[in-house]
Image (tube, rainbow, N blue to C red):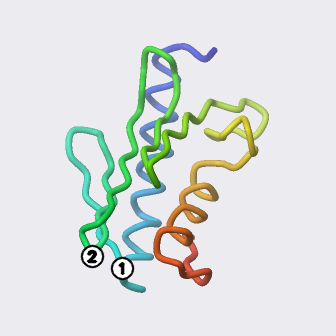
């Protein structure tokens, strides 16, 4: 497990990068990104759903609540990224997949 200071630095950097990618993807439509107190929210235009991205310092994970599921990403030192252990997807790739599923739009990309 990484130490708390490293976790905070890496999670802040990862969530900021994701936020910027989400802002760019908003132009394609269907959702809006908002950040409050270190929590990143993706709100969908139809109002039926919301994704929540939260750093969880005590367990050193980034949590995503989306599609009625909780995803707990852990720091992968080799990849230098937060990844979902079950699939190996990093934060950006997992978020892209979840957006595609929610919006039923395979063309959504996060760059």
The dot on residue 30 is: 1
Compared with residue 43, is residue 109 higher up or lower down, i.e. above or below?
below
Residue 68 x, y percent position in the rendering: 44, 49
Q: Which residue is mark 2?
A: 45
Q: Quadrant of residue 20?
A: bottom left
Residue at the farthest left position? 36
Quadrant that contains the N terminus: top right
Residue 59 x, y percent position in the rendering: 50, 17
Label 2 CA crowd tier, 10 Å (few <14, some 14–19, many 20+): few
Number of marks in the rendered image? 2
Decide if residue 68 is on the left or right side of residue 100.
Answer: left
Query: How far separated are the C-alphas under marks 1 and 2?
Result: 5 Å
Q: At x 55% / y 69%, what residue is drawn?
A: 101
Q: At x 50% / y 25%, what residue is drawn?
A: 7
Q: Earlier in the sequence, mark 1 or mark 2?
A: 1
Q: At x 41% / y 51%, what residue is drawn?
A: 16
Secondary-structure class at tag 1: loop
Label 1 CA crowd tier, 10 Å (few <14, some 14–19, many 20+): some
Quadrant that contains the C terminus: bottom right
Contact, mark 1 vs mark 2 (Cβ under 8 Å) = yes
Residue 6 x, y percent position in the rendering: 52, 23
Compared with residue 3, is residue 63 higher up or lower down, i.e. above or below?
below
Decide if residue 97 is on the left or right side of residue 44.
Answer: right
The dot on residue 22 is: none
Secondary-structure class at tag 2: loop
Q: At x 71% / y 35%, what residue is drawn?
A: 85
Q: Quadrant of residue 37?
A: top left
């Amino acid at each position: 497990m990484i130490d708390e200071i490293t976790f905070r630095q890496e999670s802040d950097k990862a969530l900021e990068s994701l936020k910027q990618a989400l802002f760019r993807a908003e132009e394609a439509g269907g959702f809006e990104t908002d950040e409050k107190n270190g929590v990143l929210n993706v709100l969908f235009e139809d109002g039926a759903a919301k994704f929540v991205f939260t750093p969880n310092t005590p367990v050193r994970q980034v949590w995503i609540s989306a599609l009625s599921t909780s995803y707990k990403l852990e720091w992968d030192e080799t990849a230098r990224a937060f990844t979902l252990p079950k699939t190996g997807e990093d934060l950006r790739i997992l978020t892209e997949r979840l957006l595609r599923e929610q919006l039923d739009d395979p063309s959504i990309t996060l760059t």
